[in-house]
Amino acid sequence: MSISRGCRGLLVTALAVTTGCGAAAGERGDAAAAAATGFTYALQRADGRQACALLAPRTLDELEKPEQTPCAQAVTEERLPAGGAVRRVDVYGGQARVVLTGDTLFLAHFPSGWKVTAAGCTPRPEQPYDCTIKGG
Amino acid sequence: MTPRFLRENGLSLAFGTGFLLALCGQAIAGHADFNNALVSDGMEPIGLGAYLTSSDFAVDVTENWQSEYLQFFLYIFVTVWLLQRGSPESKELDKAGPESDEDQLVGEHAPADAPRWARVGGWRQAVYSRSLALVMGGIFLLSWLAQSVTGTAAYNEQQLRDLQAPVGWTQYITAADFWNRTFQNWQSELLAVASMVVLSIYLRQRGSPESKPVGAAHTATGVEG
């Protein structure tokens, strides 16, 4: 797991608190990675209910909206790519990106923990990731 | 604090207090603004404590600090050589440069109550002779570095919220966001200095040391009221 290069390269201890770098980022990165892998493992087991419990509210709403399908059913029908092992975690403030061997997920921090805001994401040059599920 | 202490330190006390009040105002307004953006993006608002330790607050503070210290560093340093006829912000027109030891009261010309490093020669006098510009310039560079570091984190938080890849520090300092924040502060500081230099040629503020005496000629240079 790697924390962003920007954080690693700068040994400005006094600024660590405000940049989200340092030891705290490691714990936050671990928690974000755990939420991301928890989400993908739940989908592997076809456990839509558990996967939905790890979705951010707006992402969950967007998933249910088109067909008024319950989240647990809609999320398993999306056929998101298998996640796999964690390759990289970036955490800045209340936002995180977790790159797995098979997928990239974006997460946001809520009082109840890290929640997936977007999944099934593939990078596009000079543009936001193209994500299968995401908030509005 | 005695009335005498307050009278003799009114300038620093007033500006120090004003700074703290303005910083509190920025913290409260910035917190509300940040939370408005979070809620609009479907995120949970954060507490004031979390905002005060966030990169978003830090970059907003440091980008203004660096430009203010740059302004005063330049003013202190550039006015050694550059002059402006008629401005109380300029030295007299024949005094460009670091001036003589006699003019600057250093070494053998130092009075009994001169700072010790002004009396002694060598590196200590050389450093002390430039200490104001060195410290102001140093704070500018540190604030600018802090802006770049906290700006990277704030920029990346927004990037992730927008489902975009974060960038490293070296990428950020060549990014439009960094230079937009930098130049928008620099231009306003340089405008304020240029305005002060020129307007103080023709306009007066009775009793202010930043102005010439009210009756001084427009051509009088290096005269403060």
Image (cartoon, coloured by chain):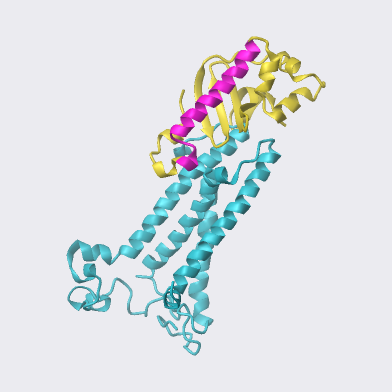
Q: Determine whether, in the image, residue A35 is placed left or right of residue A14.
A: right
Query: Looking at this view, is B198 or B113 the one in front?
Result: B113
Image quarter where the N terminus of chain B lies is bottom left
Which tint was used for chain A?
yellow
Picture coordinates of residue B166, whole percent (x, y): 53, 33
Q: Quadrant of residue B139?
A: bottom left
Q: Is residue A107 above or below residue B153?
A: above
State which quadrant residue B82 falls in. Answer: bottom left
Question: Residue B17 at what x, y percent from top left?
Answer: 51, 65
* Image position of A20 with respect to B135: above or below: above
Please determine whether, in this image, residue A134 is positioned above or below residue B131: above
Range of magenta residues: A17-44
Image quarter where the C terminus of chain B lies is bottom left
Looking at this view, name the residue that lies furthest to the bottom.
B215
Q: Is residue A21 magenta?
A: yes
Residue situated furthest top in the rendering: A45
Q: Nearer the viewer, residue A27 or B220?
A: A27
Is residue B139 highlighted in magenta?
no
Task: Name the residue located 41 percent from the left edge and 44 percent from the top edge.
Answer: A14
Quick check: can you spot residue B174? Answer: no
Query: Residue B93: image x %, image y %?
Result: 37, 79
Residue B14 in percent (x, y) is at: 50, 69
Chain depicted in cyan: B
| Quarter occupied by residue B108 | bottom left
